[in-house]
Image: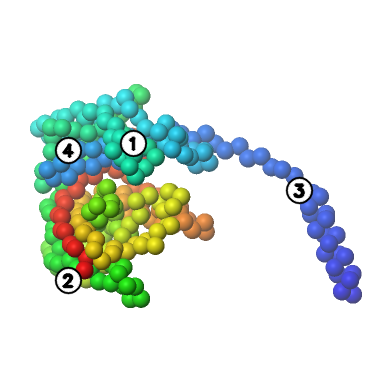
Amino acid sequence: MKIKNIIYFVSILIIAFSCTKDIEIELPETEEKFVVEGWIEQDQYPVVVLTTNTPYFDKFDSTALMDMFITDAKVTVSDGTTTEHLAFTINFQNLENADWPMVYFVGDTLKGEIGKTYTLSIEAEGKTLTAFTTIPQIIESDSLWFKVDEGQDSLGYLWGLYSDDPNTNSYFRFFTKRLGRDNVYTPTYGSIVEDKFFSGDTLEFSLVRGIGSYTAADAYDDDELGYYKIGDTVVFRLTTIDQAHYNFWRTAEQEIMMGQNPFSSPVQIRSNIEGGLGVWGGYAADYDTLICK
């Protein structure tokens, strides 16, 4: 009886495989859209990176990335009184930690001010993109310290205290930079926070060191992944942002995290760019330096 069952099962498999055929799926054409990542911080000039989107299944490497940058757009930023045309710039210093230079539009006259609203306008290839953002009030943490993680000799996390004002609704994004080791400020893991979850309370929070690029081949090949180390001098950049800016990075971080799980549902990233994708955001930044010991 068992032999008959085996023969029957094998016969079914043979029939099933003999009936299969290659199926070619024609993917729809991807609508070309402009993608913006722009920001302005108090006492700093505005910076705008402008690219096009790319089809999901297209080959993606450093050459493809460079082809995505838009270099001939007209990019302006206005605070309602002063309007500045941003100049196209290539920063080859970025090659120290990357395979391509930083390509962006940057100002040299208009600097960010606390409490002001800034309008971004982009004209490129017959299309117009617009967005606005505000720079809120600066908010500081109460204290900051380093603590070695359990089971580690010299690696640990940064910890801090923050006392929330119950009369305000605030949105935050956290960054850190290890002096002498990092060239740029990197968002911490879970960098986006809204104070409605601890309104009026004193919050003790930890800072897990973020990854500079989630797409890099060696992004997770780091013995100190997520950690800071005794001897590191770390600058904590606590930024306050407006709600639209927060909504973009909250959904973008969710998509980055969920994108590593093939069984998760995609997240709709909430852009504040009219006519395109991406974000234009203001930062009110407070800086605190700590030596890990």
Q: In the picture, residue 192 is in which quadrant? A: bottom left
Point out the frontmost of discs 3 and 1. Answer: 1
**Label 3 secondary element:** loop
- Mark 1 Cα shell of 10 Å, populated few (<14), some (14-19), many (≥20): some
Q: Look at mark 1 in the image and give the residue it sits on.
A: 101
Point out the frontmost of discs 4 and 3. Answer: 4
The picture places residue 143, in percent across and down from the top left corner, at 14, 67
Q: Earlier in the sequence, mark 4 or mark 2?
A: 4
- Mark 4 Cα shell of 10 Å, populated few (<14), some (14-19), many (≥20): some
Q: Look at mark 3 in the image and give the residue it sits on.
A: 20
> At 21% across and 30% down in the image, what residue appears?
86
Q: Earlier in the sequence, mark 3 or mark 2?
A: 3
Q: Is residue 237 above or below residue 81?
A: below
Q: In the picture, residue 276 is in which quadrant? A: top left
The picture places residue 25, in percent across and down from the top left corner, at 63, 40
In the drawing, does residue 269 fall left or right of residue 54? left
- Mark 3 Cα shell of 10 Å, populated few (<14), some (14-19), many (≥20): few
> At 38% across and 56% down in the image, what residue appears?
254
Mark 1: amino acid: Pro
Give the CA distance from mark 1 to mark 4: 19 Å
Q: Look at mark 4 in the image and give the residue it sits on.
A: 45
**Label 1 secondary element:** loop
Give the CA distance from mark 3 to mark 2: 63 Å
Q: Is residue 108 above or below residue 116?
A: above
**Label 4 secondary element:** loop
Q: Which mark is residue 202?
A: 2
> At 24% across and 44% down in the image, what residue appears?
281
Give the CA distance from mark 4 to mark 2: 34 Å
Q: In the picture, residue 193 is in which quadrant? A: bottom left
Q: Are marks 3 and 1 in contact (CB under 8 Å)?
A: no
